[in-house]
Amino acid sequence: MFLTIRSRLFAVGILLALSIWALIPTNVTQRVRDPATGRMKDTTVRRVPINLGLDLQGGIHLALEVDQSKGPVPDCADAIQRAARVVRTRIDEFGTTEPVVQIQGRCRLIVELAGEKDPARAKGIIQRTAFLEFRITDMQNKFRDALPEIDKALRLAGVKTAGQGAAAASVTQLFGADTTKAKAKTPKGKPAPKDTSEANAPGALSSLLFQGQLPGEYLVPEENVPVAESLLARQEVQRLVPRGIELKWGTEVLSRAGRSYRTFYAVEDRPIITGEELQDAKALRDPLTNQSVVTFTLSRRGGRIFERETGRHVNDYMAIILDGRVVGQPPVIKSQIGQRGQIELGAKPLQDAQDLALVLKAGALPAPLTIIEERTIGPSLGQDSIKDGIRAGVVGVALVILIMVGYYRVSGMLAVAALGLYVVFTLAGLAGLGFTLTLPGLAGLVLSVGIAVDANVLIFERIREELQHDKLVRTAVDEGFKHAMSAIIDSNVSTALTAFILYLVGTGPVQGFAITLIIGIAASMITAIFVVRTFYMLWLDRRPDMVTLSV
Amino acid sequence: MIRLFATADYDFIKWRRWAYGLTAAIIIPGFSLFLVRGLNYSIEFTGGTLIQVQTAQPVGAERIRGALDAAGIRDAEIQQFGGPNDYVIRARIGTAGTTAEGTTEATAAAVDSALARSLGPPPAAFTIVRTEAVGPKVGRELQGKAFLAIFFSFIVTLVYLAFRFEWRFGLAAVLATFHDILTTIAFIRYLDLEVSLVVVGAVLTMVGYSLNDTIIIFDRVRENLRKFRRQNLYEILNLSINETLPRSVLTHGTTMATTIALVFLAGEVLRPFALVMTFAIFTGTFSSIYIAAPLLMYIEKRWPGEDARGARMFRRAAADAPASPPASPPPAGGAGGSGGAGGARSKAAV
């Protein structure tokens, strides 16, 4: 409370700088569907990082529930957590910006896809049964050996090299040392077969790929992913992929030397085991080595199959594939594994292990999901609403400014200046904490402007009362703030508590409202109590002899 | 300098019985109507199919109804939605057990073909803007959740106010807020507003707002109880309400300005929300003065606190001194209320 003006201004400055930093438009990479080809592609948009909700942007809202019609599901909460994991993975494939996958209550899942317009496709992807499989990666580098052929075929088909021309070779060894190390551990893998200089011209496909850390792993720079995807989908490429090998994209995005790469794997087409045989998976931390570990248990039958297969593939890498996408980095098979096994994640945090355990369990989804609610919201409706909401907000704020300045004069102007900061803080809070702005949220924002004014009104009225008692200006200001404090805190805290309960108990739109209200209350306390006080201090400091205060 | 109600000295508490009468006149018919006919729940609560149609010409709801009746889609609600060309058709699915999916698509298709027969082929004459399917199960759960949220917020408020003030204040504040819920339900019933999730949010915000306002006045009561040891609760309450009156007028004026801006400008989707919020400000202010404050007096009389000041008298000391109950000590001099100029003799804290 008794900070100097300088340190107060400094604090306000830092808050403002942080807020502006949170609101600076950033490059956001979005995966959108190309209307021409129907494929997913990445586009980079520069925009203010505030997420618009489903209602403002249009899209699809789905509520899913564990289907209990064919008998009750014993552990509903666990089942829905697994389902959320699967659905999240699938929606990544879907490419919606800011998808909401939210567990509601015990047995319900809310999926919101803002900006998506095709409900049939969304439902298809979400309701498909999850499929988990373990496959050995391309240990003999068959795919890499086939790359020159593929490049040639592509050249014949008239495909120009799209990747960076500098890498005029076949697969570039991005992490040479790592690959050799990986190979040293895999006696079965052929010794590094191709020299990079062999290829005579830049290959259309191979110039996009970088060798990863283990056989069969490739890295594709993020910006080249769409090109690589379209090349791989071509018939001449599909025809030339070696027998017994399939190509799968990974879920991991790695960043090396300031660039990000998507992982891409060549794996055997035959799974050594599928999720049907998986019974349980748990994440834990090995107390001896302090490593994160995922232990899993297979069925009796699965254990026998796994024992046989892993016996044949010791020192090979095993890709964990969920719904056709390789999850995480394939672990190496250290020795023969039976019914129980464990995956070591090394120094990675336990959270990663828990995620992997969830993925493993999700593959064996215990119950299908049924859609109980589906809503498609036309974006035009959102457009109108956002326009109306902004118009109402502008008019509302204008009225507030008019009343405040008209009634409290200079002090009112201080309050209005603080109100401007309040709006910046609130928006920054929404952007910084990654909350989504919804239509009720917009209303909550407009309303909380009114509530923010209340704190100022309380303070100003107190100052007026103190002045009425013939106190000196400086004393009146101090006393006014001091006495208004308890009312401001008690009323705001109780409103915030109510909003917090709304957030806990409510659903989507109500939560959006509660969030803007909570952030708004926090911002209003900061501006009314701290910022306006600082303004007053500055003002009184400039005019120490002030006799009448304009309030 | 504009100053509103700076020297206000109104006897608010005197009018409490009139206020009870007024509030009963609002609540009893409205609430009975609510008990008999329920509320106009949105599709989120009832379950069914909602189809929004945009027509090329303003055809009128009757024509759409005619088209649907001819096709056998009965009991559908047709409502103009925003402009003259926008309509919302609500067809409720009869049995609760059926899954929404198939029925929704069937209903949407039926509406589509019925309109095509009456108005002309789809893209030219009309377009279906959106189709929503909602299972009634969602509604029932949400209703439960809304009540749960209110219940929890009451408990949290009671605890918080018991901690910051005293349990008597908490009880009065919560009862006043409960009163606001009743009046708001009556209000929604009178205007036949559609109760959607957002309106439920508005009702819940009203709970927060009403509490907020009550606490501002109670905060002053707490302060004045410490300041003026010789005055009774009746006087203290009146004094506190009068002292906070400029603030109440200013704050409610500005907040109401924003919600009224929402009512007129924020469009059809937000209008029920904005109407409820505007009413919430009115009822929240009303109840803080005429319900919460007198209730605090009654509670204090029934379960007296340490200094038992509420039990002493129920009338303004200066005006009705002879009529005060025999148990009362000599009335504190004509302190009269405003400005807090008189009566500050003791400074012992409670």
Image (cartoon, coloured by chain):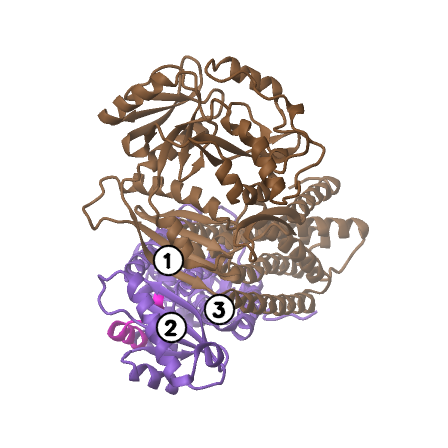
Chain colours: A brown, B purple
Whether residue B222 can be seen here: no
Nearer the observer, A533 or B218: A533
Nearer the observer, A208 or B258: A208
Image coordinates for residue B140, horizontal then vertical, percent? 28, 60
Chain containing the residue with disc 3: B
Magenta stretch secondary structure, dominant: helix
Using the numbered discs, state the Cα–Cα distance from disc 1 to disc 2 in whole angstroms.
21 Å
Q: Is residue B233 magenta?
A: no
Magenta residues? B29-43
Name the N-terminal-most of marks 2 and 3: 2
Image coordinates for residue A311, horizontal then vertical, percent? 34, 16
At 49% across and 13% down in the image, what residue appears?
A185
Using the numbered discs, state the Cα–Cα distance from disc 3 to disc 1 in whole angstroms.
28 Å
Total residue callouts: 3
Label 1 is placed on what type of residue? Val
User: Which of the image's four quarters has the N terminus of chain B?
Assistant: bottom right
Name the N-terminal-most of marks 3 and 1: 1
Residue B245 got which mark? none
The residue indicated by pointer 3 is B270
Label 2 is placed on what type of residue? Ile
Is the residue marked by circle 3 packed among few (<14), some (14-19), or many (20+) residues within 10 Å?
Answer: many
Q: Quadrant of residue A88?
A: top left
A404 horizontally vs B165: left or right: right
Q: Secondary structure at mark 3?
A: helix
Residue B174 got which mark? 1
Eye-nearest disc, 3 or 1: 3
Label 3 is placed on what type of residue? Leu
B117 horizontally vs A13: left or right: left
Eye-nearest disc, 2 or 3: 3
Q: Secondary structure at mark 1?
A: helix
